[in-house]
Each structure stands twice: as structure tokens, then as C-alpha cells.
Amino acid sequence: MDFYGGPVHPSPPFNAPAARRLREALGMAPGHVAYGLAAQYGLRTSAETVIAWERGLATPGERELTALAGVLWCAPGELLAAAGTLREHRMTRDLTVDDLARRLGMTGASYLRMEESGRWRGNEKQSAALCRALDLSAAQFLTATGRDEELAELLSSAVTTRWQAYVRPVAKLVPLDRALIQDVLEQLHTDYQALMVSTLSWSSTGQERSGSTGDAGRGSPRYIQYRGDPPPCDRTHQTPPSPPSGRTALLAKHALACETRPRRPTRPRTSARRAPSSAG
């Protein structure tokens, strides 16, 4: 069913095995489901169509999905696979466009435009209301609103420069408390800078070892063996890793943790020495 003359949407992620399992649990045949769809919801559906849904050969539309859930005495969300878009999350909660828009304090037409485009443009208050209405985690909110890439760019910049300047931009994207965002950005920055220091230190150590040997071993069989490929000692001369901009999923999970993990205190290394032998 279309709202406000909008375009026809793609079918939701239908969970075919769940539909068959629920029907069989009720002791119903596909013909009984087809009759219920027609009698209760006015949908002319054949038993063959119901079988095709259960085999994954066809997918019910939004109106058919809601009616099928009613016939099978279940919630629409039980007939859906993992939701990813705003529309799928809304259907999982069995909410109409107008119902959800009313909870967010906007018109149905305004919300529908954002749902169709996949780009959320609500303010911080509306974003928090959306998460409550659809029971979205912060990670689900980012995926459903199409903000994954934008967040990854902000996090990549935050770890390489002053992270304090990115608290406000990140808070506009993610409906989380600013104090938590500050803690996460500081932790990301600290971890990345520590990685940079350790990498540069490793490279410097390899360079010193390489310089001490000079060119004496350049003609050795071991060096010729690696012609066209840096020998082991030169492989330590690596360029420091770039900001983790390509690791969107990892950054998002780190940045959206519900709580920051306290660091474990490092134990000082103790070198075990043998006691001098008393014999002799």
C-alpha cells in the first residue's frame, strides 16, 4: 500500500521458514491461510501463492505481510529477517508512516521522504525519539539512516588531529550522551597515537640495524635471494599505518560501545634469574 502517492517500495526481507513454521504450529494448511487473507483482509490470494512465499519463490508486499501476520497470530516482525532500513524497522514494529511521524513530531510526508531516500535529516531530539520508537541501538540507527561513512570520516580525522573538535559533529550523527562520545574519542585517539609511536619505534630500530651492516652483505646469496623483494631487515622499514578510515565497521563498533572498558594495569616485566649454584 502506497502512502501519499509515493513510489512502490521493494519487498521487505521476508523470513520464509518462519512463515511455514508458524503455519504448521497452528495446524493450518496453505489453503486455510489463503482463505483467512481473503475473509479477514480482502486479499485475493491463492494457496499456491502462500506456498511460494514459504519456499522463498515470492515475497509478500507490505500490506500482505501485515495481513499474513494477522492470520498466523504473530507480529509482523516475526515474519521478517534482520531489518536494515528505516522502513524495515518500522514494519517490524507494526507502525504506519503517520503513527511513527506523530511520535517524532513531524508530518507523515516529511518522514516518508526521508524513509524513501534513506537519508535521515531529523534533529537530535527527533533522532532520540526515532531510536525509542523503533527500539534502535546506536549501531542500528547509523546503518538505517545511512550515516556509517560520514561517521567513519569524522573518526578518522579525530584520531589524527585534535579529537576535542569532533565531539559536536559526532554528537549530531549519533544519539548518544556527549560525555560518552568524549570518552570514546579520547580512547580512540590514545590508541591510534600509541600504535603510531610503536610503529615508528619499530621502524627506527630496523633502520639502525640495517645501517650498522652497511653494504657489506649486498652481494651475499641471502640478499640476492630477496632481489626484487626487500630482505627481512628492510621489511621493518614500513610506512606508519594510515588512519583507520577504511575500517568502518570496526570504528563504528568501538565508537558506539555502551561503556568504555577500563584499561588493565600493566605488570612490570621481571627477569627470572637463576640462583648461583652452591655446589662447587
Image (spheres, grey):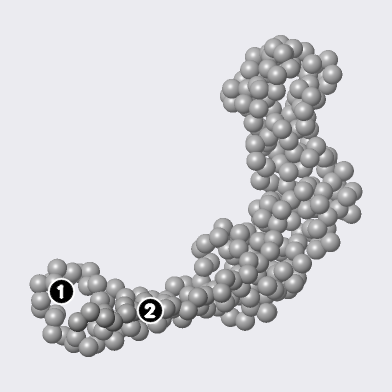
Residue at 40% x, 82% y: name it: 201
In the picture provided, is 24 more to the left or to the right than 216?
right
Question: Circle 1: is it few (<14), some (14-19), or many (20+) Cα within 10 Å?
Answer: some
Secondary-structure class at tag 1: helix
Q: Quadrant of residue 186?
A: bottom right
Nearer-the-camera pick, 193 or 172: 193
Which numbered disc flags the more N-terminal residue, 2 or 1?
A: 1
Residue 255 in the image: state x and y as whole percent: 63, 65
Q: Residues within 10 Å of mark 2 (few under 14, many from 20)?
A: few
The x and y percentages for residue 140 are: 68, 52
Q: Which residue in the structure is indicated by mark 2?
A: 271
Amino acid marked by disc 2: Ser
Residue at 83% from the left image edge and 15% from the top image edge: 39
Check the picture and name the quadrant holding the C terminus: bottom left
Residue 16: image x %, image y %? 63, 27
Do the residues bearing badges 2 and 1 touch, measured as CB atoms within 8 Å?
Answer: no
Q: Nearer the viewer, residue 259 or 271?
A: 271
Q: Amino acid at mark 1?
A: Tyr
Question: Which residue position is annotated with label 1?
Answer: 223
How far is mark 2 from mark 1, CA to CA?
Answer: 35 Å
Mark number displayed over residue 208: none
Quadrant in the picture for residue 13: top right
Q: Is residue 91 above or below residue 242?
A: above
- Does 238 sit left or right of 128 as displayed? left
Can residue 279 be seen?
yes
Number of numbered discs: 2
Does residue 63 appear in this view?
A: no
Q: Quadrant of residue 181?
A: bottom right
Say which element carries label 2: loop
> Who is closer to the viewer here, 228 or 280?
280
